Amino acid sequence: MPDSALLKMEAMTTAFSSALNATQRPMWLNFHCLGPWAPWCAAQGNSWRIGPDHHDSWESLSEVLLVLGSAAKHGGPYRWTDPDFLMTGGAGCDDFTPGLQCPGMTPVEYKTEFTLWSIAAASMLVATDVRALSPLQQEILLNKELLAVVQDPSPEAGGLAYRPAVPLHSEVWARTLADGSVAVGLFNRGNTTSTISVDFSRLALPGCGGEGYAASTCKAAVRDLWAHADRGVAEGHYASAVEGHGTVALRLTPQR
């Protein structure tokens, strides 16, 4: 888009935001930032679209996550990122039948979508009849442990923390939560199962590396948020097999 059009959009959005504030009535303004981020976006509204429409396909989800991973770090109270609708809710299915799974992606891919939206503290929007959720939709959309992550009162959003050197196509997403624990997503962009490891020293786990600690021996209790199971206490790192296009969701709680 030409610079002149971007400047016009910035001016229009700024004027609209000012007009809403002038009413002195509480309102929530969602607007399009015309890209992953621009300095003027933070002051104009409460949630901002980070890119094009999200469709019910792996190709679309993969593209959205490329932007969300870096854009989400600009999020915070009253300025959350909006990567568009969760396809898990049924949006995008022309032949969607209430109570049936939306057919565009696999259950593994839908879980990746919900996990990384949660860690990014992104807007959770669905377009479906919530009275007739399929078993898969209930499993994903009503995951209380991941909903606790997205609703956590931490003032900072999460996002892509780093990309491990190996295996290829692997990513570690993270969000530090208000109680000092860290929500982590081990995301496999590849097509086949790979083992992905999270290095605790790269997450700035509270207390790790401080007095009485060494990054290599930092310990954390590990909770699997999809299995709803404790995985014991890990030291220095934690590794898990991750299906292709899948994400293992963890909550790490630092231990002395």
Image (cartoon, helix red, strand yellow):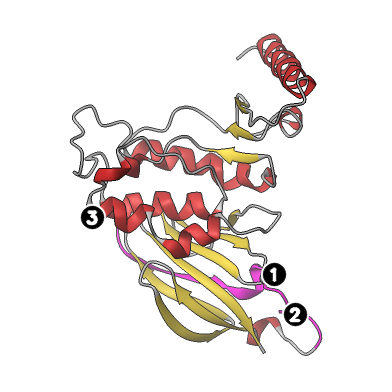
Return the disc, 3 or 2, that comes first in the chain's sequence: 3
Q: What span is in magenta?
A: 192-211
Return the disc, 1 or 2, that comes first in the chain's sequence: 1
Q: Amino acid at mark 3?
A: Pro
From the viewer's perspective, is residue 181 above or below residue 5?
below
In this rendered view, identify the residue nearer to me: 92 or 135: 135
Whether residue 19 appears in this view of the structure is yes
From the viewer's perspective, is residue 215 above or below residue 226?
below
Q: Which numbered mark, 3 or 1, is in the foreground of this view? A: 3
Residue with the mark numbered 3: 135
Q: Are marks 1 and 2 in contact (CB under 8 Å)?
A: yes
Q: Dot 1 lies on which element?
A: loop
Q: Quadrant of residue 15?
A: top right
Q: Amino acid at mark 1?
A: Ala
Q: Which numbered mark, 3 or 2, is in the foreground of this view? A: 3
From the viewer's perspective, is residue 235 above or below residue 160?
below
In this rendered view, identify the residue nearer to me: 66 or 16: 16
Q: Position of residue 205 (x, y in %)?
A: 67, 73
Q: Quadrant of residue 31?
A: top right
Residue under the point 60% across and 68% down = 182
Residue under the point 39% across and 73% down = 228
In the image, taking residue 256 as reference, residue 119 lies left or right, namely left
Return the disc, 3 or 1, that comes first in the chain's sequence: 3
Residue with the mark numbered 1: 204
Residue with the mark numbered 2: 209
Which quadrant does the N terminus fall into?
Answer: top right
